[in-house]
Image (cartoon, helix red, strand yellow):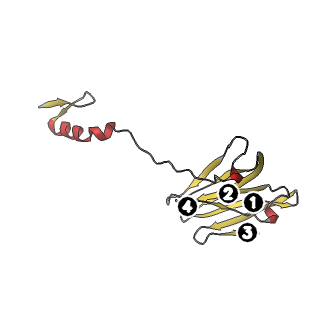
Amino acid sequence: MKSLSLRGTVAGCALSSALIVFSSQLLAAPSYDITVIGPTDAGHTRSTDNYRYSVAKYLNTAGQEAGYADRYNDSTSSGRSAWLYTGSSTVEIGLTDSGHTRSDGYQNNKAHFLNAIGQVAGVADRYDGSTYTGYTAWFYDSTIDATYSMD
């Protein structure tokens, strides 16, 4: 005996029953869980229009992501922050001390590598007052929540 499947194709009895069993799954609308990642605080939100810009650059098999986000001082751009999404929360990473902060508060950190256990390597701009003096490589170890300068 032959039957007509939901797609209009003819199939044998054994195949036909399999198609009927799975037809509701094939036609069901997919569902998704959406998680906001990256920093969402006031320092990463432009005050004039609540604009945020964050990019996930690296993903590992543990579901962790590393990236960067624009920083703002009210409506003025104040650099970029590097961040790591741990699978449950976002952590700002990189070097943010006075040697890596311009006199007006500008900071620029970039993640360049994420490994399988959540360690991140990147660079931070270095300043003397308002003068850019180069950059410093850094290493973030998520297992102990510590950032190390490679200077």
From this view, report whether residue 6 is shown above or below residue 90: above
Q: Which residue is mark 2?
A: 82
Q: Which residue is mark 1?
A: 124
Reading the chain from its start, which is encountered first: label 2 or label 1? 2
Q: Does the residue at mark 1 contact the one at mark 3 (Cβ under 8 Å)?
A: no
For marks 1 and 3, give the CA distance.
11 Å
Task: Compare residues 137 and 98 and report the one nearer the observer.
Answer: 98
Which residue is drawn at the image coordinates 28% and 39% (left, top)?
A: 24
Which secondary structure, mark 4? loop
State the mark number for residue 86: 4
x, y percent for residue 131: 88, 57
x, y percent for residue 120: 63, 63
What is the crowding at mark 1: few (fewer than 14 residues within 10 Å), some, or many (at least 20)? many
Q: Which residue is mark 3?
A: 150
**Label 3 sits on what residue type?**
Met
**Label 1 sits on what residue type?**
Ala
x, y percent for residue 116: 53, 63
For marks 4 and 1, give the CA distance.
21 Å
